[in-house]
Image: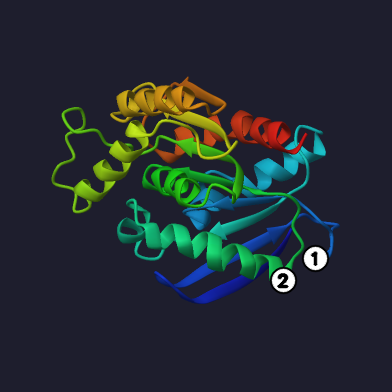
Amino acid sequence: MARLHLTVPDTPVGDVDVTLVSPRGTRRTDPLPLVVAGDGPEYSRRAGIVRLLDEAADAGRCPRVRVALLHPGERNGRYAANPDHAASVVEHVLPAVGEVARTEGRAVMVGASLGALAALQTHWRHPEAFSGLLLQSGSFFLRGVDGEESFEHWRRVTGFVREVRRARRARGDTVMALTCGADEGNLANNREMARVLERLGYETRLTVVPGRHDWPQWRRSLKPTLPALLRRVTS
């Protein structure tokens, strides 16, 4: 796998570091679908996203893709429903990736916990950017349900979730895949978000798997779900 490290400067949240991984045997000029992963280094190291996708492509379960591993930086400030982060990804990171490697179609974005919330907001603010989202154990906090009121960005997060719940229709045709652990605190708000997205008209599937709010669970649920999502949006 070929890795290229980029620093995207002067975005609304400051410089954003990206590691772009391309499949072996491909060139930068080859048009390939793009997967964008928030918490990218963790997704690579702890969930094995790059190897998983390489093996799935070898087995014919999904196309070969490039993977943009986003380094989180100041994670809570960026990922907790910050519209500046959404603008940084779509208006700065995606064009920067396109300047160094050819991509094909709309990207797929992946995130876990606050990263899933950030992925959903990035789509919500920029509906044209992504063909699919994989939202793992999203922190879709609800007032009166989730006891996270002490979180520094609680009001911003719940305000965005309320905005989505009050919407009347989908913003585009992005396919939504959600996963959540059966034994974690975010299960109730993930079920509610899946219901909301389906009501709005999104093609939505929530998969509840054994496990908690941690990387072992996200790794297990990533393996079947991400290749299936890629097949769906690239077919």
Point out the image quarter for the N terminus: bottom right
Res. 48 image quadrant: top right
Position of residue 38 measured from the top left corner of the image (x, y, whole percent): 49, 53
Q: Considering the numbered disc 2 on the image, is that residue within a helix, a strand or a loop?
A: helix
Residue at left 57%, top 58%?
A: 69
Q: Which mark is residue 100?
A: 2
Q: Residue furthest front?
A: 168
- How is colour applied across the structure in the image? rainbow
When the figure is inspected, residue 210 is found, relative to residue 172, above or below; the finding is above
Real-space Cα separation, disc 1 to disc 2, in angstroms: 7 Å
Residue 64 seen: yes
Residue 106 lies, with reference to residue 26, above or below; the image says above
Q: Residues within 10 Å of mark 2 (few under 14, many from 20)?
A: few
| x, y percent for residue 110 | 53, 45
| Sequence-first tag of 1 and 2 | 1
State the residue at coordinates (61%, 62%): 94
**Amino acid type indicated by mark 1:** Arg
Circle 1/circle 2 CB separation < 8 Å? yes
Quadrant in which the C terminus appears: top right
Quarter-wise, where is residue 82 in the image?
bottom left
Residue visible at 37% across and 37% down in the picture = 164
SS for tag 1?
A: loop
**In the rendered image, is residue 71 in sight?**
no
Identify the residue at image location x=54%, y=38%: 134
Quickly name the residue at label 1. 28
Q: Is residue 182 left or right of residue 104?
A: left
Q: Where is residue 55, by image quadrant?
A: top right
Q: Residues within 10 Å of mark 1 (few under 14, many from 20)?
A: some
Q: Seen in the image, is 192 located left or right of residue 107?
A: left
Given residues 66 and 234, the one toward you in this image is 234
Q: Position of residue 99 (x, y in %)?
A: 70, 71
- Residue nearer the viewer, 153 or 125: 125
